[in-house]
Amino acid sequence: MTRILSFLGRLFVALVIPAVAFLVIYGGFIFLRDSDAPKWIVAVVAIVWGVGGVALLYTVFNGLVERMPAKWTALLQPFVFVGPGMVILIWYLALPAVRTGWLSLFDRTGTNFVGLSNYVSLFSQRLLTEAIRNNVLWIVFGSTFTVAFGLLVAVLADRSRFERFAKTLIFLPMAISFVGAGVIWNFMYSIRPGDSVQIGLLNAIITSLGGTAKAWTAWTAIAPWNNLFLIVIVIWLQAGFAMVLFSAALKGIPDELLEAGRVDGATEIQIFFRIMIPYIMGTIITVWTTIVIFTLKIFDVVWVMTGGQFGTEVIATQFIRQSFVANNTGIGSAIAIILLIAVIPVMIYNLRQFREQEAF
């Protein structure tokens, strides 16, 4: 009986708080929508109403729970804070995923049930097989080179006098969005005809050294190798993320362990491969799987650089093209489900790694 009451109490707290918060915020939205006040006043009131209202609700419910017997407080208090987040995740993540799976069983209009025909059709289309092939390239080259480059920089910078400066330079691209990186690298590969001044960095360097400008953009038309030109961008973006984690892991290696290896006559390369790598293997796997998830969901860079043309389609660009350009709801939903299924095993593996490191 106690367990049942405990469960009902948790469920009540988890559902009532977001329900009341939603009603309060919705009431405020209706009030502000019909208001004739200036826009800046409406904006200020909306912020105060939304943030302050939710904070007040948390304070009130937390106060109520803290006045209960200690046993009930320990059982219910986590749900005051975690419960609303779980409900919001279910509403905005789990339910849309279920609905997308259901829509993938219908035709392009979303009205006629066609079973698994959309999935059969997808795997018989050249564009999807091309997208899957390109995503495999992104996983193999993108994640592997990002991890390798990040690890190399972390090891070399760790022994340098310019450690902070070098790490700052490598980490800076992390502050740039994927869309912004695509725009920047469009200029990197840019070419101008004839004797015009080259605004593309690569061609500017070549011409300043007496060479002839090259049409890098033409190189990007050679499938599937043109994908490597795009993968370089993600390596540039994510190497800083990998470097920071590897650097923290390397600094956690006991100095006595490294000194013992050197006393035994091990070279620096042997210390790297036989002591450092095994010691931080958990971090390497975690970083690699995290970047694999990024590469599976890659969209922005491809869309900005090539629009998915010249054999550079990936699964995410195919999803956008089918759902919002071709208005084919069934095929678009099926692609989204395939992408979700591809990401789930990597996510589970990543969570297990976090649990083994007692970080989750």
Image: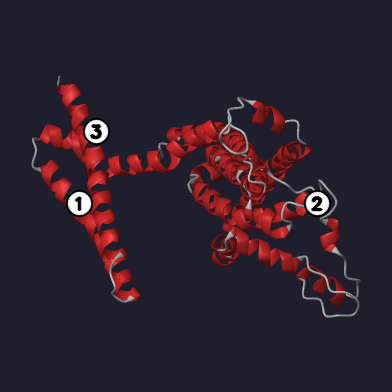
Which one is earlier in the sequence, the residue at label 2 or at label 1?
1
242 horizontally vs 82: left or right:
right
Residue type, label 2: Phe
Which residue position holds label 3?
11
Which residue position holds label 2?
310
Rendering coords of residue 332 (x, y %): 62, 40
Quadrant where the N terminus lies?
top left
Q: Is residue 351 above or below residue 255?
A: above
Answer whether residue 268 is visible to the viewer in this image. no
Q: Foreground: 93 or 27?
A: 27
Q: Which mark is residue 175?
A: none
Residue type, label 3: Leu
The residues tagged by marks 2 and 1 sit, at their Cα atoms, a distance apart of 54 Å
Residue type, label 1: Leu
Q: Foreground: 19 or 71?
A: 19
Dot 2 surroundings within 10 Å: few (below 14), some, or many (20 or more)?
Answer: some
The quarter holding residue 289 reads: top right
Which residue position holds label 1?
57
Rendering coords of residue 357 (x, y %): 44, 36
36 horizontally vs 358: left or right:
left
